[in-house]
Amino acid sequence: MAQQPERRAPQAHVGRVVRTERLTPNMHRVVLGGEGLARFDAGQYTDHYVKLMFPPAGATYPHPFDPAVIRAELPREQWPVTRTYTVRDWDPATREVTLDFVIHGDSGLAAQWAIAARPGDEIVFGGPGGKYAPDPAAAWHLLAGDESALPAIAASLERIPEGATVEAFVEVADATEEQKIPGVTWVRRSGRPHGEALIEAVTTAPWHSDDVHVFVHGEAGFVKELRRYLRLDRRVPLDRLSISGYWRLGHDEDGWQASKRDWNTQVEAEQER
């Protein structure tokens, strides 16, 4: 049965940087902890996400931080800018949350914050949200995505029962971006257009059974093509398919989120005829 979105009142948490680590040339890890996470909890889903909040230059907020109060009392230009990131790991014993950031040179508000983050730095974030976890009763699992989906795919692989049939594909720039994650088949972009190699890998992979649970996330262009393959060619029911564009080439998160609903509606209409 399909997982239903988690429903909870929005909460703001204050995470304090505990440690950081460069995993690959273009993947940076930040671990957050501290008493500001006393009300945080995750683990029901493997695609839990949080929304990091960055104040515009010069903005000051009342304490305690309350997004609803800020939006009600301050002009829009002083509202925090949000960026969405998947929870790679949540340790309820140490109360530490791990986030992995894809680095794109000198661009990216959240990525540049992550690179500069030092132990003791703090950041406010909302969440978690989430709605997917691998069904342990499925005959097999298909997971596919790019670097942005790697945290969720890695977390999902850790939840799939040992011995289960899994095909997990992650597209990265080249061999230097591959991590030691059991179960992942790395697909190297090697200069090809984003998503092209991943589409090829997924569509030519063995199809083990129609009883499949699917997770496909990442850049919206290849997500659209894989959705077409899964829905039209393989007839995967919607309730066995978790698929969404985390981002879109040529758009920052603000622009993509503003147009995402209309884009998804158009794609669904085209592919469900």
Image (spheres, rainbow, N blue to C red):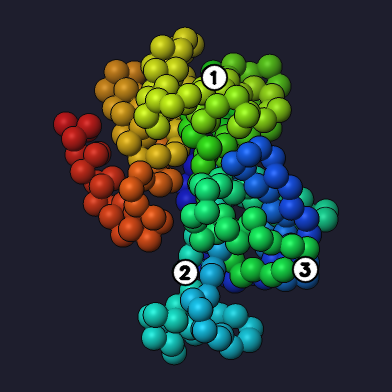
The kind of secondary structure element at disc 3 is: loop
Picture quadrant where residue 264 is located: top left
Residue drawn 78% across the image and 63% down it:
119
Residue 194 location, x and y as percent?
A: 40, 32
Residue 167 location, x and y as percent?
A: 54, 19
Picture quadrant where residue 197 is located: top left
Q: Which residue is mark 1?
A: 167
Residue 60 location, x and y as percent?
A: 55, 86
Give, as a three-letter code, the residue at label 1. Glu
Residue drawn 52% across the image and 48% down it:
105
The kind of secondary structure element at disc 2 is: strand
Marked residue nearer the N-terminal end (1 or 3):
3
Q: Which residue is mark 3?
A: 120
Of 31 and 67, nearer the camera is 31
Q: Which mark is residue 38?
A: none
Residue 249 drawn above or below residue 166: below
**What's the distance in space between the residues labelled 1 and 2, CA to CA?**
36 Å
Please give left or right for residue 61 compared with residue 95 in the image: left
Residue drawn 64% across the image and 68% down it:
123
The kind of secondary structure element at disc 1 is: strand
Q: Which mark is residue 81?
A: 2
Residue 175 location, x and y as percent?
A: 60, 24
Give, as a three-letter code, the residue at label 2. Val
**Which callout, 1 or 2, points to the residue nearer the camera?**
2
Category of crowding for the residue at label 3, using alpha-carbon neighbours closer than 10 angstroms: few (below 14), some (14–19), many (at least 20) = some
